[in-house]
Image (cartoon, rainbow, N blue to C red):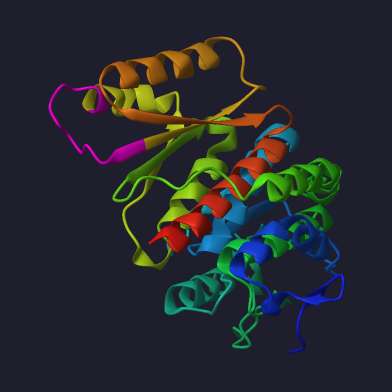
Amino acid sequence: MADFRIGGTAVRSVTDREQILMLPELIQAGLRIDFQGGHAKDVCLFGIDTASIVGDIVSDMADEFSPAPVNMVCDSRVPGWVSEDTACIVISYADIGEEMARVCSSLSDRGCRVYLVSSSDIGVERVPTVRVPRGLDPRAASGFVLGAVCRMLQSLGTFDAADRLEDELDRFTEFRDALRDRGCGPAPLPEGAVPVTYCTSDIHACSKAWKYAMGMHGKGLSFYGELPEFDHNELVGWSDRNAHAPELSMIVMRGDSHKGLVSTIVECMSEVLRENGRDVVPVALGDGTATSRNLRGILLGYCLSIDQEGSE
């Protein structure tokens, strides 16, 4: 396969950092794929690798814009409600592992329409493949996969995912350009810190992407969660006077679109944690749709993960 190029640049010839900063262009390239799919009553996405965060981004997008949900399954089990009326998109960027091959086979046996999104040359019987350029860092690959999956969903008649994503690209590119000019992302976390990333439920993909990126290559623990659910299940433990997990560094994603009660809850949570000696790092994502805030937050998380790798 020939080198994948953006503006004349062979993407594999640049650093992982530069690949990640090409996310807007990679998204645009994914949106240009040629995919012809008939109408689907339901759609379900499957995936377990870093590029599969796309399923969560699309799920958040669907919650805001789609008349029907788009579900993301993040393991190798096939839910009972998946039927022959369901179009299934399986994301497995780097290769077709045994788990995802079994998922494809199970879905095909159930009579589902199955599509594979992958860079692998190893096909799966009866499953057409949307080919992702090879040689990309998995974080950068998520850009191409996002564009491609949104084009597929729009072709399947799920909702206008490709148009919605394209509407965000100019602002996202401006954000990327400003980030590149002033330096790539937040300052690296202290040595030995265990990042715990939280954001509101409407952009749950953002905190999950940080967890994936910060935990790449087995370089340490990382966790994520959603607000305000965090307050019910974890806040009491983290604000206990006992010295539980002192290395935890909590990162709280905030967007201007959340006003009122949820915003107040997030502010109170951060205040309680600081009063109890916890390190809380706020990250402002600005306003706009869930998609725009997810894109900005994920780019910041990917940049930070690159800087963490460089600091070790």
Q: Magenta span has 239?
A: yes
Q: Quadrant of the N terminus?
A: bottom right
Against 23, residue 264 (above or below) is above
On the question of residue 120 being in view, the answer is: yes
- Which residue is more in the foreground, 302 or 117? 302
The magenta-colored residue range is 238-249
Q: Main secondary structure of the magenta part?
A: loop
Q: Residue at x 59, y 83 (%)?
A: 124
Against 223, residue 139 (above or below) is below
Against 292, residue 18 (above or below) is below
- Which residue is more in the foreground, 88 or 211? 211
Q: Position of residue 114 (x, y in %)?
A: 65, 69
Q: Residue at x 45, y 34 (%)?
A: 198
Q: Residue at x 45, y 48 (%)?
A: 188
In-image side of 221 versus 62 (left or right): left
Q: Position of residue 206 (x, y in %)?
A: 56, 43
In-image side of 98 versus 12 (left or right): left
- Which residue is more in the foreground, 280 or 83? 280
> As drawn, which residue projects farthest toward the left?
242
Q: Magenta span has 228?
A: no
Q: Quadrant of the C terminus?
A: bottom left
Q: Position of residue 273 (x, y in %)?
A: 32, 21
Q: Residue at x 60, y 41 (%)?
A: 297
